[in-house]
Image (cartoon, grey):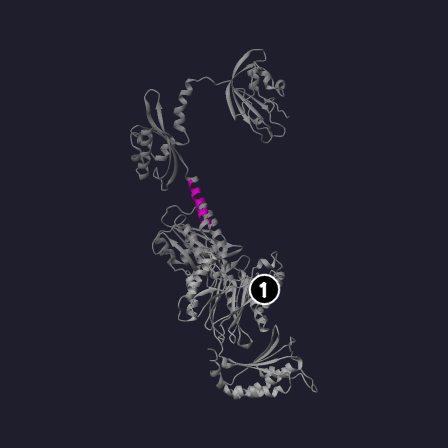
Amino acid sequence: MSTVGYGQPSRSGGDPWGLVPDEAATARALLDGSGRITHWNDGARRLLGHTAAQMLGRPAAELLADPVAATAPARDERWTGTVDLRHRDGRRLTVRLLVHRLGPHEGHPDGWLLVSPLAGTERTEKDDQLPRLAFLYAPNALALYDTEIRLRRANRAMEEVIGLSEDEARGLRLSEIGGKPQSIELEEQLRQVVESGRPRDVRTRLRTGGESREHAWLGRIAPVWDARVGLVAVVLSAVDVTGEDRAQVRLQLVNDASRRIGSTLETGRTAQELVDVCVPRLADFGSVDLLATPYLHGDAPPSLQNGVLTLQRVAHRSLREATPEALVETGQEWDHAVASSMVRAVLAGESVVLYKDDPAFHAWAEQEPMRARYARELGVHSILSVPLSARGVTLGVAQFLRYRRPDPFAPDDVLVAREIVARAAVCLDNAQRFTRERETALALQHNLLPQRLPQRSAVQVASRYLAASGRTGVGGDWFDVIPLSGARVGLIVGDVVGHGVQASATMGRLRTAVRTLADVDLPPEELLTHLDDLVLRLSEETGGDETAGDVGTTCLYAVYDPVTGTCTVARAGHPPPVLIDPGTGGAVTMELPAGPPLGLGGLPFESAEFSLPEGSVLALFTDGLVERRDRDVDEGYRLLHEALAAPAVSLDARCGAVVEALLPSGAPGDDVALLMARTRVLDAAHVVTWDVPDDPASCGTARKDVEGQLTRWELQEAAFTTELVVTELISNAIRHSSGPIRLRLILDRTLIVEVSDTSSTAPHLRRAAVFDEGGRGLMLVAQLAQRWGTRHSADGKTIWAELQLPDDCVKFAGSTAR
């Protein structure tokens, strides 16, 4: 335990009571937590006769006249009362004590402070004179009103407030002294205190004493009682809290700006929110102008053409109707001279204030006389320009004018404006960044999505794509229609989780991969398996912490065969399609194996095959169409069924009606892709099949059969080319396979030749040497056909080739579908 001598601070400087002047008129002692004395001043020596050297470290209980009956000091924060103490000479003294509980603080442990006055304890005549002087010279304004609410007394501070002396105002009511509506309200408050006898607090804003500006006042009205008469007067005590009031108003303004600015990622909306917050609370007029090219600090300043800087107005607001101070409309560009506060703020990167009597104001008036003259006519007395800077880039400038309120922009106003504008600049920068990224993603997605859907004989198609609105941005939804061999068509819809350029780029890679896999005629479930592997590799390439399964890419792939009228569908975590029956017109959700989302790896995909009547409508879509925050998926599917079942003049009209019914606002929260296909069936007269014996001599028979069929189709001009292709394909099948061989001709927009066998070995093109006897067949087929390829099935493979029809036969072949 450290001790200090009386009147001396501790060596560590941590004992604050050691710094208190050692006045002999007060006895003072400090006790530690155990009740031992750690401080003893000269007043304590005078009271009890013991010196500090004698008392330090001793228990205070030894000073009690009756130690047995004594109790420990109270644990309250403060205690007062009388105790009997023993003087050094043995006398018994009754002492009035005030005891403070001391908490643990720096340099002093738990304990107590004991004080007792030694002088000035008796009341004197001089004490009776002190209240009058205290009333007269009190720092806060005081006034006494009688029960008729007429002024009787006013101290010096109140005289300064009302601008009248006590003698000039005596006998007047408060409303008569102030002459303002607020004075009448305050007088009514005084009257209510007289009637109730209870004090009350009041707050008001009042211009008094001939001042030009209002002050904020905090007042206390209290009754004055006389023990014999009762209520004799009321006292009004007023404190000027203008500074605190303005600070609170400014703080509230900054808080409101943080809450209101940046509600969207739209540049114009954000700029308008800035001026809406500041007018009229900070200024009488506010505007936001942006640079055409943001100014990066450290770069060359924005180019000044002939001494002017071009800015674009994006938002403004005024106290006056029609906003005449704006001079330009939003969206318009206008030039500003170098001397203007806006240009100076942009170039310097600091706030600039112009007052009407400043030389800088006159310099600006010389360069822009028309605007300066209009500002004088309007009564503008101060202009504040604050640069909009965020992340080291100056985006533009916010300008504020005052002409109705008399007070000019004060330094505190400039600080508040800078704080608000700085926050708004970050929001504007975010909005511009979002806008640029969204435009880039939209352009990328537009280029990656099919510009025009191919119209095939197998299906009639229509589509809609809506990009997400708001903060989410453009996503990775896509759709496609892929021509396949045998007049078949592939329909695909997919959704890459996330938004922005990355999602659009991933979508483009997946769409390209799907087209590549579809070209080799993979069944839907196998195509999704390969696509699953690709998503896994893409996830590994990103190097992120998330697994491929977190990517959440979904896909649905359907293959429709117009010859058989069958449709094979597989999905990977994607919403199932909806089918419209051509007979009943009703819409049903197709039941499919769910399949995991792409990117999980190692899980199987399954397909389902459906036989579709001619005229059936398939609706493939992404989840943004049926899922929304304000409704569940079941409700979305119900609305979709109703919209699809409604009559429509065309497939495209039906597609538009679906979007309007499920997205009435036209602004989806997520990307929406919708692909609708009406099925057609090829006329049986345009599909011919022959079984070909496994014998080289059968090539001649096949040529004759083909020639006869082409004659019936009136395609004699295509006979020679077709017979060559048929001969080469059958010869190849006989040479490299065993078992039954089947030849099929399909008359569609092209003439399709298909040769099927039981071998699973795919043929390959090769360049035959000069003396080779074989190896030229597929080369010949490739030269004669528009397209050719191989597709595998469970019982073998099919080699196909598409031959271009003569021009005069295209019209006939184009109507092959019923």
| Residue 302, image x, y percentages | 50, 60
Q: Quadrant of residue 87?
A: top right
Residue drawn at x 40%, y 60% is 330
Residue 239 in the figure: left or right of residue 453: left
- Magenta span includes 253: yes
Q: Nearer the viewer, residue 17 or 774?
A: 774
| Local crowd size for mark 1, using a 10 Å CA cut-off: few (<14), some (14–19), many (≥20) | many
Q: Where 121 sits versus 619, above or below?
A: above
Q: Where 178 sits versus 763, above or below?
A: above
The amino acid pointed to by label 1 is: Phe
Please provide the residue range marked out in magenta: 245-258
User: In the rendered view of the protein, which quadrant contains the N terminus?
Assistant: top right
Q: Where 237 sits versus 532, above or below?
A: above
Q: Nearer the viewer, residue 240 or 810?
A: 810
Q: In the displayed image of the protein, which residue is found farthest to the right?
A: 771
How many numbered circles does the render carry? Answer: 1
- Magenta span includes 126: no
Instruction: Report if residue 489 is visible in the image.
Output: yes
In the picture of the structure, the residue carrying the numbered disc 1 is: 605
Q: Where 767 sits versus 234, above or below?
A: below
Q: Please, what secondary structure does the residue beneath circle 1 have? A: loop
Instruction: Report if residue 292 is visible in the image.
Output: no
Residue 458 in the figure: left or right of residue 665: right
Dominant secondary structure (helix, strand or loop) of the stretch shown in magenta: helix
Q: In the displayed image of the protein, which residue is found farthest to the top?
A: 90
| Residue 677, image x, y percentages | 47, 70
